Amino acid sequence: MPKKKQTTDFRYETGDAQIPWESVGEKINAPDLENIVRFLVRPKDGYEKQYDKKLDKVKTSLNDLWAVGEPSSKLTMGAQVKELENRCRKFLGVKHACFLTNATAGFEIAYKYADVRPGDEVIAPSITFIATIAYPLSIGAKVVFADIAPETLNMDPVDAERKITPKTKAIIPVHIGGYPADMDTIMKIARKRNITVIEDAAHAFGGMYRGRMTGTIGHFGAYSFHEVKNINSFGEGGLLVTNLDAGEDFSKCRFLGLDFTTTIPNWLYDVTPVRSLRGTWFVAGNHSSTEIQAVALLSQLKRIKTIIGERRRAFMYLRKRFAEDDAIYLPPLDTEDTKGTHHLYLFRIDPEKAGGTIQDLKKLLTQRGIVQIPHFGPLYHFDLLKKMGYNRKKIAVTCPRTEQVFNREFTHLPLYRFTHDRLEYLADNVLDSIREMRG
Ligand SMILES: *Cc1c(COP(=O)(O)O)cnc(C)c1O
């Protein structure tokens, strides 16, 4: 008699049958694991020989382990994902959380809940990553760009409100660099007009806005666990959250309209579309992440507070150093109830006082070999948008502060994963370069 497995997934529920469905997929074996270890832990330069020796030991140990263990029978949508979602719900203080392939998938689902369709309008900040607006662009909805508040680079709610039309279905503020957008004002504006607010919290997992966690204030919020974010799930991952009852259907949104949490008595009726906030129906895609990604994230979740703390210390150091020169604007400080995640340092100068623009300064920094800065530029300047029929010049006129800040004043600086010496070197060289520019 084969022993009975605990199943968590209706697809493998075969009752008393002797031949389980789960047996149709290949399992992980010892060489798979060895290859994963070999990939995740690379040999340091000059240590290749020692590395090979240690890896041999790992191989032996893995084989020993395999002699007393058996492969995990569940690689996707099992207990680890559930545990991760529970932990995230608690950490964020939110009702529903759904682990996904990435934040972009989270936005897509949220846009579908908002019933964004071709011809509708969505308001996004001018400066963000293309992922924020990929879904509306892809279906032929119109993206309207709100100007930014120069102090934070976040969406200016007053300008967003000016740009609302009867076609506006969603507003998607971004907590760029990890500093919270002005959510209370945005929510007030949106609620008056029945507009759905989706937070792009890709940089903002673990941040706080007036006592609530960033990402949990809008109707929906999505976090990214891509490898460049504050914590990651082996390279890719995302989390969609909401406090609305609509979140009860998240499981269906993740996987083609099927709900893993119940059994499926009749496939004809149990594969369903999902109801949007406006009562219409939408069809879900497949955005499932894996158990092993959940394991990675559960592990990193334990150190999120330490990570943000370390980032905050680096932020405070840079801010203190940059206070030495009055040509440099200082970004907002954390307060008792509003805290950034310090994903990036928002660096901004007054070109008059600095004797040159940010472009001049960046050239100097590149010449010195200090830092080459990849940049969030205004999306309406992208060629992609031009090809989609957006008029760069016309939009630029409606976003004057974006133009000023992007062309003349701001850049992001990295602040994490290097030693204090490097941080000091960065600050010294930025300050020196400004002095050089001033002449
Ligand atoms: C990284 C990023 C995203 C996309 O996150 P994915 O998980 O890669 O989809 C969205 N918005 C911003 C501002 C980002 O930096």
Image (cartoon, rainbow, N blue to C red):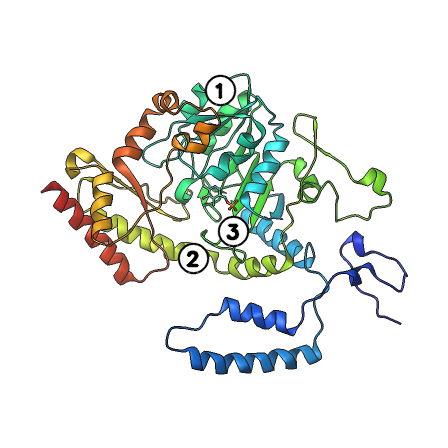
Residue 266 seen by the camera: yes
Helix, strand, or loop for circle 2?
helix
Front residue (pair 50, 252)? 50
Tell me: residue 277, above or below residue 437.
Answer: above
Q: Residues within 10 Å of mark 2 (few under 14, many from 20)?
A: some
For residue 225, which numbered disc appears in the image?
3
Residue most extreme to the front: 387
Image disc number at residue 164: 1
Q: Is mark 3 within 8 Å of ligand 1?
A: yes
Amino acid bearing label 2: Ile
In the image, is 404 to the left or to the right of 258?
Answer: left
Residue type highlighted by circle 1: Ile
- CA distance separating discs 2 and 3: 14 Å
Residue at (59, 37) in percent of width and height: 108
Q: Is residue 308 left or right of residue 240?
A: left
Mark 1 burial class by Cα count in 10 Å: few <14, some 14-19, many 20+? many
- Mark 3: which secondary structure? loop
